Amino acid sequence: MLLRRGAEADIYLTTWYDKKAISKIRVSKKYRHKTLDDKIRKHRTIHEANMLSSAKIAGIRSPFLYFVDPFNGEIIMEYVNGMNAKDVITPRTCFKIGEYAALLHTHCIIHNDLTTSNFVVDNGELVLLDFGLSYHSARIEDQAVDIRLFKRIINSAHKSIYKVAFSHFIKGYSSIVGEKRMNRILENVIEIENRGRYTMIS
Ligand SMILES: Nc1ncnc2c1ncn2[C@@H]1O[C@H](COP(=O)(O)OP(=O)(O)O)[C@@H](O)[C@H]1O
Ligand SMILES: [Mg+2]
C-alpha cells in the first residue's frame, strides 16, 4: 500500500516475513539518462542503507534494515509503529532530538534533514528516519547547519512552543557534548543566520 509519494522515493507499507515493513523505493527520473539514473539510484540506496546502520553505531534508534536491493533502488525496513513527532512534539521529545543530533555529530554523521516529520515516537522512544541526505563530516559548520535546520522547523511548524522546544533541544545536545562545545556550535549557527540575512538584504 502506497503511504507517501516523495520527490526522491515512494514509501509503501508492506510485509517482510509476516512482519509489517516499510519499503522505500527510489523512483526513476525520466529526465535523467537511463544508465546514469540507474547508477544514481543504486548509489543513493546503498548510501542511505549505510548511513542508517552507522546511526545505530552512534547509539540512536533508527529502523532495522531488513533488505536492500540496490538495483531496484529499494530498502525494506522495520515499520515503526508510532506517532510522527511533528504531531506530538513535546519538550521531552525536543530534549531527545537534541541528544540524538549530538550523538550523530560526535560520530561524524550529519543527518541533513532534521525535521520533526523525520522522527517517530514509538512507546515513548524516539526513532529517527530518513537518512537519504545524510553524510559523514566532522566539520563544526556542517553540524551547525543541522541545528539551524531544526531551529527553523520548530520556529515555523511549531511556533507556539518554539522557545521551550529549542531550549530543550539545546539542553539535550549539551548533555552529550558539554556546554563549551555547544556554545561553539551555537556561535556557528548565529553566523549562518547572519549570513542568510546579509544575502537577503544585498
Ligand atoms: N520505517 C518507517 N516506519 C514508519 N513510518 C515510516 C518509516 N519510514 C518512513 N515512514 C513514513 O514515511 C514518511 C516519509 O519517509 P522518508 O524516509 O522521510 O522519505 P522522504 O525522503 O520522502 O522524506 C516519514 O515521514 C514517515 O511518516
Ligand atoms: Mg523525510
Image (cartoon, grey):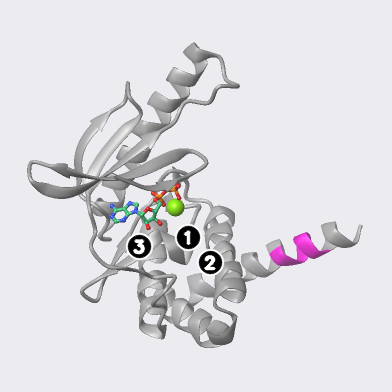
Residue shown at 44% from the left, 31% from the top: 27
* Residue 176 lies in the magenta-colored region: no
Q: Quadrant of residue 15?
A: top left
Which mark lies nearer to you, 1 or 3? 1
The residue carrying mark 3 is: 103
Residue 148: where, in percent of width, then height?
Answer: 59, 65
Q: Range of the magenta residues?
A: 193-197
The amino acid pointed to by label 1 is: Leu
Residue 137 percent location from the top left of the image: 47, 46
Pinpoint residue 160: horizontal percent, then vertical percent: 57, 86
Q: Quadrant of the N terminus?
A: top left
Q: Residue furthest top?
A: 35
Is there CB contact under 8 Å for labels 2 and 1? yes
Q: Is residue 13 above or below residue 33?
A: below
For the residue pair 42 and 18, the one nearer the viewer reads as 18
The secondary element bearing badge 3 is classed as: helix
For residue 35, above or below residue 178: above
